Amino acid sequence: LDLSRRTWIYTVHPDRYSIVLTKFMIVGADYLLRYSCGRGEGMAAARAVVDAETNCEDILMNFVVAMETRKGPLLVGGRHVRDWGDVRNEGGAGKGRGGGRGGSVGGAKEAGFRALSGVEAVGLSAKGDHRKRRGDCIREFHRALGVMPLRYSFGKVVDGVGEQGLCEKAGKLVPCDAQ
């Protein structure tokens, strides 16, 4: 909540969270049914926002679960999970998934800019207005559903505090923090 502008916003905070990305979620099938087939104009309007934005499905799923449980999510950490959606896992030029980084696109190299490629270029979070658009989704879901169910969680069930993703370094998979 941005009190100065009196509006909901999307932020990232290291010590609290109210949303878990869908790629990290484990939810019961009943929540998937409520998300996909939930009746009522509010859910239909919220799903229309997801379709229009091609984004925010994770935020809506968190709304669905929080409306039922009236609790925030619980983060359970995992070790040595390779996240192919993380740009640090793209690899070098000509290596597997999506090519490398730094190629010349549309004169970007000549202009002194590093060109983006693969996941980094097309990923939703690569867009400059990504957080603003996610904040817009939160506001639209709040408006459509008539409730703000998201609750902060502070606890985490994890081994350690550092990054848990794996990245390739010298032909080996290592924790991304070790790069």
Image (cartoon, rainbow, N blue to C red):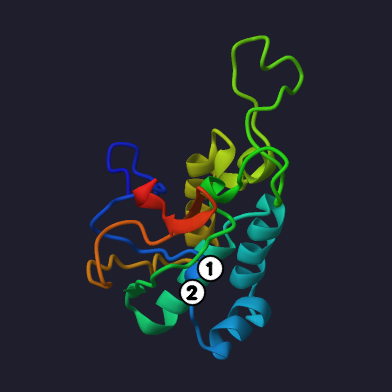
Residue 32 drawn above or below residue 146: below
Question: Residue at (43%, 57%) from the top-left corner?
Answer: 174
Regarding residue 166, the answer to whether it shows in the image is no
Location of residue 117 (image quadrant): top right
Q: Label 2 amino acid?
A: Met
Query: Of residues 173 and 98, which is closer to you in this image?
Result: 173
Query: Of residues 7 and 160, which is closer to you in this image?
Result: 160
Q: Label 1 amino acid?
A: Thr
Residue 81 drawn above or below residue 90: below
Label 2 to label 1: alpha-carbon separation: 5 Å
Left or right: 163 with respect to 86? left
Reading the image, the residue beneath label 2 is 25
Left or right: 172 with respect to 94? left
Query: Of residues 118 and 42, which is closer to you in this image?
Result: 118
Question: Residue at (55%, 46%) from the top-left corner?
Answer: 87
Residue 118 drawn above or below residue 175: above
* Residue 35 coordinates in the image, percent (x, y): 60, 77
* Residue 13 coordinates in the image, percent (x, y): 29, 51
Reading the image, the residue beneath label 1 is 22
Could you tell me which secondary element the residue under label 1 belongs to?
helix
Left or right: 9 with respect to 13? right
Could you tell me which secondary element the residue under label 2 belongs to?
loop
Query: Of residues 12 and 61, which is closer to you in this image?
Result: 12
Is the residue marked by circle 2 packed among few (<14), some (14-19), or many (20+) residues within 10 Å? some
Question: Residue at (32%, 43%) from the top-left corner?
Answer: 2
Q: Badges 2 and 1: C-beta atoms under 8 Å apart?
A: yes
